[in-house]
Amino acid sequence: MCFVFEPSILQNLGLDATLQAKGITSDPSPSGCQYLLRPLRSSDYGRFEEFTFRPSTYFIVVLEDLALRKLIGCATLFVELKMIHNRSKRGHIEDVVIDEAYRSRGLGRLLVSVLIEVGRSQGCYKISLDCDSDKVAFYERNGFKQETVSMCIRLSD
């Protein structure tokens, strides 16, 4: 089994005994889990391989309900190498999602906290994220502050 990052990073998180946080693997059906988003397609394996070729860059964490063997949450920390700030690292949190049936239980907060700790362990000087305006209050409750304006140009649909 091939992991995107070293699983030991996620040890000692103090999770509830019914939950497990873990990194994604190339195993198409980890622990016989049901899928949160969708089953892997054969075309996904190439992308997975790209993640593994960039060690210490992508940290994709999932939450599993151990009793139901079901993936119930997922989030990503992308670590960017910087030339400024003494050639340090900056983290970006992306793709935070919790299964609707598990929302309002603090699991989004848990995933974000896990990624913050991973960023800290990787030497990030800061972690940022982009979110929709209806999610701002959630991230503010989790320690984030509005700092800059995010802009983008879409290159495809």
Image (cartoon, grey):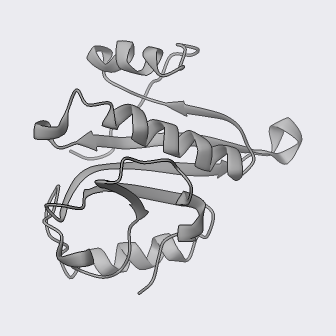
How many marks overall?
A: 0
Compared across the picture, whether 101 is left or right of 109 comes to left
Quadrant (top left/top right/bottom left/bottom right) for the C terminus: top left
**Residue 29 image offset from top left, x and y in percent:** 21, 78
Q: Identify the residue at image location x=50%, y=37%.
A: 113
Residue 34 higher or lower than 2, as above or below: above
Q: Is residue 98 visible?
A: yes
Residue at the bottom extreme, as displayed? 1
Compared across the picture, whether 142 is left or right of 96 comes to right
Quadrant (top left/top right/bottom left/bottom right) for the N terminus: bottom left
Q: Identify the residue at image location x=54%, y=19%.
A: 143
**Residue 134 image offset from top left, x and y in percent:** 26, 15
Residue 136 higher or lower than 4, as above or below: above
**Residue 127 image offset from top left, x and y in percent:** 60, 34
Residue at the right extreme, as displayed? 86
Return the residue nearer the eye: 103 or 65. 65
Q: Identify the residue at image location x=17%, y=43%.
A: 99
Q: Is residue 153 visible?
A: no
Residue 118 higher or lower than 147, as above or below: below
Return the residue nearer the eye: 104 or 140. 104
**Residue 148 image offset from top left, x and y in percent:** 56, 16
Residue 23 higher or lower than 14, as above or below: below
